[in-house]
Amino acid sequence: MSGEASASGPSPRAPRPGTQKASGTVTKKGERGAKEKPTTVLPPVGEEEPKNPEEYQCCGVLETDFAELCTRSGYTDFPKVVIRPRPSATFVPSASMSEKPTIDEQRLSASCSLNSLESKYVFFRPTIQVELEQEDPKSVKEIYIRGWKVEDRILGIFSKCLPPLSQLQAINFWKVGLTDKTLTTFIALLPLCSATLRKVSLEGNPLPEQSYHKLMALDSTIAHLSLRNNNIDDHGAYLLGQALSTLQSSNRTLVSLNLGFNHIGDDGAGYIADGLRLNRSLLWLSLAHNRIQDKGALKLAEVLRPFELTHTEVVERRRLLLEKGTQERLRSPTSSRYGEYKSDREKNQLTGVSSMALVDKADKLTSMKTPKGLGKKKEKSGEVLKKEEKSGSGQSPTQGTPKKEDATKAGKGKVSIPEQKPSRGKGTKSGSKEKRSILPESELVAEATEMINPLLEPVEHRDGKVFMPGNKVLLHLNLLRNRITEVGLEAFLAAVQYQVQFHKPKSASKGPVGLLWLSLAKNCFPPQCPVYAVIQELMLPRDPVSKAKPREDEAMAFPP
């Protein structure tokens, strides 16, 4: 039994390895089928080439171009381009808000809670907010990027999709994690954009090297620059002051500069003031919420009234005046008195020879027309002329020519010599030009039509020192919430009194008028400070905003 069992035992187990082989073959066929199926779905190799972002032609719609370039660059999840939400109107609670909600309203709010939660999370997703000039998606006016890091790859995509935006005016980056390297890439992108791009805002992006001054290079076209909350200290302020102006160069495009909410102290304020000495383009400056004390306030107030030029500035001024004088001499047609005298002498020789030829022709014509008696008289007069020539035979040929009076008498209205008049006129003009070169510096500068460098402005000499009138171009200065005391207020009071006295906005002159708005509130002095009250009284009539408000109030009080 045991033998039969043992004999019959292995018989049912024998086919198991066969079944394993069969199953093994089945799995191999399944694997082959699985491997062959995706190969049929894959597109041909020739269709993968258009996915290169370099070959994509932008259509001018930022939403389409940015999404296509991101997919071609390998991004699976990228920010979406959305229209920037505008601030809603003031919310007025209705009477029904005070009533208790019904059961149906509670059920509806419970069903909508999930959707509202999802919408809140969507709000925090990275987006590119845009403002449109019109409803046309191609008319993007401003771009806002906030709260997500902008890398080199994203900037590379921007370099392709931003230039087609012909109406782009502003780019705003708030806390986008910029570095000095990505800032350099961003600055290289700006010239590729439309010429309408004039406003750049980089806020909440502290840089280790503080290379924000590169945005204010000489070839920059940025007119409005905001650098708030970037931890800019005195070193960064020094670089920005050098970008505003130096003895050799000056920024001519920047109109407004916002440096609020930084770490600028007295030294930094002094560097900014040094940049304002020779800058004549900046109209709006904000240094609010910084660390400026009285020393920095004195530096800033000094620039707003006549200040003394340093030795290097005086030397540069003299060099510019010499260059200006040499350029004016080269532009004039006659360069020296000797040249003018020589040209007049040559003209006199030519006029003398021409007058002799004309006299001979006149004599021949008269001898043919006049009778014999008169002809004899003419011959006698000719003999007298010959005797006079023989008596003066020792003179030079130029001296032997007849005098101007004789030539005019011989012509008697028939022969005129107009060549002598312009020579006399030129002589008088040349004399006036020589006098111009000898004029003092102040008159030379006053005659100039274009004053490129502020050092060529009219100056005042006092006690052997040279004083410049000061910066009269700056209209708006904000020093809110600093550390200025009454000592700094005294300096600003002197500056405001000077500008109010000499520069009035209502005057008919088209020149600069000086400060129109000055903010010194929330500093280290009491609000009832008399000096601050005087500054407020002096600046109130100059503030254009305060003038416009009463008119609006009158219009609201007396409607048409």
Image (cartoon, rainbow, N blue to C red):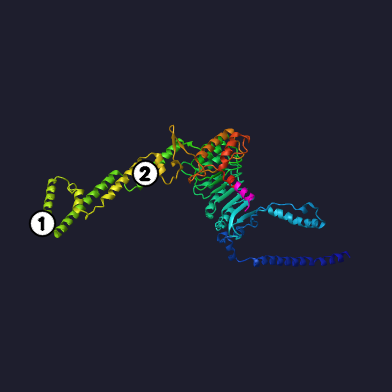
Query: For this view, does 1 lie left or right of residue 418?
Result: right
Q: Is residue 485 visible?
A: no
According to the picture, the residue beneath numbered tag 2 turns out to be 326
Which residue shows up at 80% across the image and 55% down it? Answer: 106
Q: Name the main secondary structure of what is drawn in magenta.
A: helix
Q: Residue furthest top?
A: 463
Q: Quadrant of residue 520?
A: top right
According to the picture, the residue beneath numbered tag 1 turns out to be 373
Q: Which one is earlier in the sequence, the residue at label 2 or at label 1? A: 2
Q: Residues within 10 Å of mark 1 (few under 14, many from 20)?
A: few
Q: Position of residue 454 (x, y in %)?
A: 46, 42
SS at mark 1? helix
Q: Is residue 556 magenta?
A: yes
Q: How many marks?
A: 2
Identify which residue, 226 or 433, lies in the foreground.
433
Up-down relation of residue 268 to residue 38 (above or below): above
Query: For this view, does 349 lie left or right of residue 266?
Result: left
Identify which residue, 153 or 188, lies in the foreground.
188
SS at mark 2? helix
Query: For this view, does 314 lie left or right of residue 282?
Result: left
Q: Quadrant of residue 57?
A: bottom right
Question: Which marked residue is nearer to the observer: mark 2 or mark 1?
Answer: 1
- Circle number at residue 309: none
Magenta span? 550-560
Q: Position of residue 274 (x, y in %)?
A: 51, 39
Identify which residue, 129 or 57, lies in the foreground.
129
Q: Amino acid at mark 1?
A: Gly
Q: Residues within 10 Å of mark 2 (few under 14, many from 20)?
A: few
Q: Position of residue 51 (x, y in %)?
A: 59, 62
Q: Is residue 347 magenta?
A: no
Q: CA distance from mark 2 to mark 1?
A: 66 Å
